[in-house]
Image (spheres, rainbow, N blue to C red):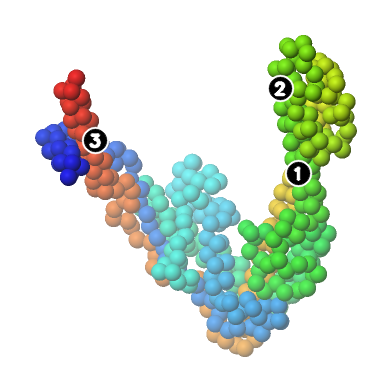
Amino acid sequence: MNDMIDLGRYVRAVIRRWPVVLALAIIGALTAFVISRVLPPVYEAGTTLLVTTPKLKADFDSRFRSTLELGLSTALNRTLFNLIENRELEAQVVQVMGNALTPEEQAPGALMGRIGGTQVGGDTSYFQIKARHSDPAMAQQLANTWASVYVAQVNELYGFPLEAEGDIGTSLDAAKAKLGEAEDRLEAFQRETGVGLVDNVQYPASFSRQSGLADVRNLFGLYERYGAAGEALETKNLTLGSYLAARDTVNLLIGQAEALQGQGSATGRDLPLELLSAGEVLTARGRLGPAALVTQDMSGVLDALRAEAVSLEGIIAALQADVGALQAKLAEKQRQLIELVRERQLAEESYIILALKLQEIETQTQLHDSWLLVVSPAQLPRAPVSPKVLVNTAVGGVLGGLLGVLAALLMALRSEARQVA
């Protein structure tokens, strides 16, 4: 009941100071409104495309059946979708638009920041190329130009006329040879280095050639994942950890010895020298025998401990350098692995696309004139997508109101504190 009464008191305190709450809410809303009006508007235009891939399934060899069963069209559409944003396409758009772009917009990478691709309704066959610009007409022109150049680029890569069956066959043979070379490089790399696949590399589902390596599902441990270099790194890390523990033990004894050095009668017997026998490193080195140190005065014990500490620091520095070198080596091997897997995956996709096209021509199936169709060109945007003045104003008002409530509560607490004083 007391809690309810206290809560009611604070509510009434806020109500009594409603002008403060209202004033801060208005200030917050006005501030957000002014900032939203000052910020330059950004308009967005989008061109919708449809992927018109061949409907025929080619009779590939057994290596690719799993890929077809998992949905070839999805993989193909994803490949075409990923081609939306690339530097070569950007350079062609800059050349087409010419002086319509500012010098800053013609710089490499500038237009890439204004372009984005999204799927429409979760269907991988439909996607939209969106362009953002402070000028609505430029947003529309940029979206349509990017889409037209993109369609031309895709058709140049994968589009062949009916009479080009011989060219397709030649390209298919070259693609198949390139795929075999990519597979051989990947297998040779893994056999030579022992480096296996890691979590952030998606291995192609269709890759089933036997290379004598452990299956990816069994690659759990450091040695299994990273080969001999990984085993060396693990061993080196364990050794480094042992030496770090030995150094800590010696430094602990040094600190205690320094504290006892002022006592003239103090000897090694006053130190917990049994710690020296607990560490494998110190025991193996045999430079600090507890039996020999027990009878020495504290000055002699300190000299022996400090000499050992200096020696351990040198060994630790060398071990840390070795660990760093091994880590760099593994990082480089991992980068090479990712590149090889990606190279093999791209070679497979190119081979599948060309094989589908050749199969379609050989069966005299009606070919599409284009792999992509513009379903809906970009329209002139009527309103900017940002900043959202009404939304920002409302949010500013709410935040200002909350700040006003907090101010009212602080004023009430301050008033109560004065009355108590």
Relative to 41, say whether 286 is above or below. above
Relative to the observer, which residue lies in front, 264 or 344? 264
Q: Nearer the viewer, residue 83 or 101?
A: 83
In the visual, does 194 lie left or right of 376?
right
- Pointer 1 residue: 237
Would you say residue 317 is visible in this rendering?
A: no
- Amino acid under disc 3: Leu
Q: Position of residue 45 (x, y in %)?
A: 38, 57
In the picture of the structure, the residue carrying the numbered disc 3 is 406
Which of the two residues, 296 or 307, is positioned nearer the viewer here? 296
Gap in Å between the C-alphas at discs 1 and 2?
A: 27 Å
Q: State how far apart marks 2 and 3 are (Cα).
A: 53 Å
Which residue is depicted at the point 77% across and 52% down?
230
From the viewer's perspective, is residue 391 above or below residue 344? Answer: above
| Amino acid bearing label 1 | Asn
Query: Which residue has dot 2 on it?
Result: 255
Check disc 2 and report its element: helix, strand or loop. helix
Q: Quadrant of the C terminus?
A: top left
Residue 57, quarter of picture: bottom right
Instruction: Count neighbours of disc 1 (C-alpha within 10 A) and say few if under 14, some if 14 to 19, many if 20 or more.
Output: some
Within-10-Å neighbours for mark 3: few <14, some 14–19, many 20+: some
Q: How many marks on residues?
A: 3
* Rendering coords of residue 149 (x, y %): 51, 61
**Where residue 48 appears, x then y in whole percent?**
42, 66
Indicate the quadrant where residue 343 lies.
bottom right
Q: Residue at x 82, y 62 (%)?
A: 191
Which amino acid type is shown beneath numbered disc 2? Gly
